[in-house]
């Protein structure tokens, strides 16, 4: 019975891997590492390191590490600016692009379709906000309109349920080798956009009026940041799905704010947390599915590790505060605010 359980779990390991044997034969070749049904237990070294000698796991790790670093850095700016709801709107706006790209070009059309939809949504949201329309209302309009269009497009396909599941929950384990570089490239563009405007973005986060008085274009900075968020969403939606993208953008920044009050430490802390969480998420899913016979979806497992990490950091922060380590300075000014002010002063 144990052997049967292991065999069944391995064949269906992560929902997306059922397509690998039929479409590309990757899993069949990779199983030479360990034949089906052979595993009963798995060592920690196998789970954390050995798993990534398998080609499709190595590709998933490379893409997720790059995406985690970029999402962590962009997510800090999202957290400082309070743009979590806009990020949510952009994640849903990508869905019709994914659906249309899949319908027109198959899996090769996913990335271009998502990129066009995301950048269009970023421009529209920025314009609506600058036009004086309430931000929440604009986001709600874009969110519902685009998501409904995506569902309509997907429903026209032959495999409605299968296509919808892949778009919503991702396909991180079935990323073709040819898509690795494009996904890395999209992430790199997002990182470059925020890196070039970093001081201006921080100035605007700290003092929007002062930023405008200094000559910074609020519309341009908003568009750059929304565009960077959109590009992260594009890459993440192609891996862990549109419903789970928000965790990659929001959780690392929130963890960094809990872990440190030093401004320039927020970015490396967020990137490090996201990278470790992505690595552990893939490792936990591999160990649970292949080693323990528990069928775990890859994207959902990664997000669960992100949330569990946040819960642990939140608990640690609460304990530290209870033990007399306050997060503010004696004057009552949060250190992040003081750091922002110092950065702005240096930039001017």
Image: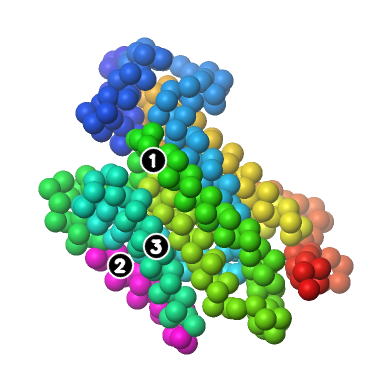
Q: Position of residue 308 (x, y in %)?
A: 54, 45
Q: Is residue 314 magenta?
A: no
User: Which range is magenta?
Assistant: 131-149
Closer to the N terminus: mark 3 or mark 2?
A: 3
Can you name the residue that lies furthest to the bottom here? 132
Specify whether 299 is left or right of 26. right
Q: Position of residue 172 (x, y in %)?
A: 39, 39
Answer with the quarter of the image where residue 13 lies.
top left
Return the residue at label 1: 179
Return the residue at label 2: 146
Q: Is residue 167 at least partly visible in the picture?
A: no
Q: Position of residue 10 (x, y in %)?
A: 33, 24
Mark 1, secondary structure of its residue: helix
Which tag is nearer the camera, tag 2 or tag 1? 1
Give the main secondary structure of the magenta stretch: helix
Q: 76 or 312: which is nearer to us? A: 76
Above-or-below relation of 232 to 211: above
Q: Which mark is residue 210?
A: none
Residue at 51 percent across and 20 percent down: it is 50
Closer to the N terminus: mark 1 or mark 3?
A: 3
Which tag is nearer the camera, tag 3 or tag 2? 3
CA separation in Å, label 3 and label 2: 10 Å
Residue at 48 percent across and 47 percent down: it is 185
CA separation in Å, label 2 and label 1: 25 Å
Q: 193 or 93: which is nearer to us? A: 193
Q: Which mark is residue 118?
A: 3
Mark 3, secondary structure of its residue: helix
Closer to the N terminus: mark 2 or mark 1?
A: 2
Above-or-below relation of 167 to 276: below
Specify whether 16 is left or right of 47. left
């Amino acid at each position: 019975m144990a052997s049967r359980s292991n065999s069944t779990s391995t064949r269906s390991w992560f929902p997306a891997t059922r397509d690998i044997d039929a479409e590309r034969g990757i899993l069949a070749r990779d199983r030479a590492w360990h034949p089906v049904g052979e595993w009963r237990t798995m060592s920690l070294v196998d789970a954390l390191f050995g798993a990534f000698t398998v080609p499709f796991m190595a590709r998933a790790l490379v893409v997720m590490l790059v995406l985690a670093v970029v999402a962590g850095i962009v997510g800090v700016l999202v957290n400082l600016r309070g743009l979590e709801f806009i990020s949510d709107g952009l994640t849903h706006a990508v869905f019709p692009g994914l659906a249309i790209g899949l319908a027109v070009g198959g899996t090769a059309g996913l990335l271009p379709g998502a990129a066009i939809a995301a950048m269009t949504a970023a421009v529209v949201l920025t314009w609506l906000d600058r036009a004086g329309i309430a931000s929440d209302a604009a986001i709600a309009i874009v969110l519902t309109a685009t998501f409904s269009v995506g569902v309509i497009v997907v429903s026209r396909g032959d495999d409605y349920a299968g296509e919808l599941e892949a778009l919503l929950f991702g396909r991180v384990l079935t990323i073709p080798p040819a898509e690795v570089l494009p996904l890395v490239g999209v992430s790199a563009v997002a990182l470059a956009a925020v890196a070039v405007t970093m001081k201006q973005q921080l100035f605007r986060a700290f003092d929007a009026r002062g930023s405008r008085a200094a000559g910074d274009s609020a519309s341009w900075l908003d568009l750059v940041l929304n565009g960077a968020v959109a590009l992260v969403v594009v890459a993440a939606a192609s891996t862990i799905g549109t419903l789970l993208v928000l965790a990659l953008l929001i959780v690392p920044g929130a963890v960094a704010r809990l872990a440190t009050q030093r401004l320039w430490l927020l970015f490396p802390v967020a990137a490090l947390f996201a990278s470790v969480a992505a690595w552990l998420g893939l490792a936990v899913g591999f160990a649970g599915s292949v080693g323990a016979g528990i069928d775990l979806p890859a994207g959902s497992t990664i997000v669960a590790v992100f949330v569990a990490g946040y819960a642990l950091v939140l608990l640690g922060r609460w304990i530290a505060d209870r033990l007399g380590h306050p997060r503010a300075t004696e004057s009552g000014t949060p250190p992040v605010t003081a750091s922002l002010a110092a950065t702005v002063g240096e930039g001017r």
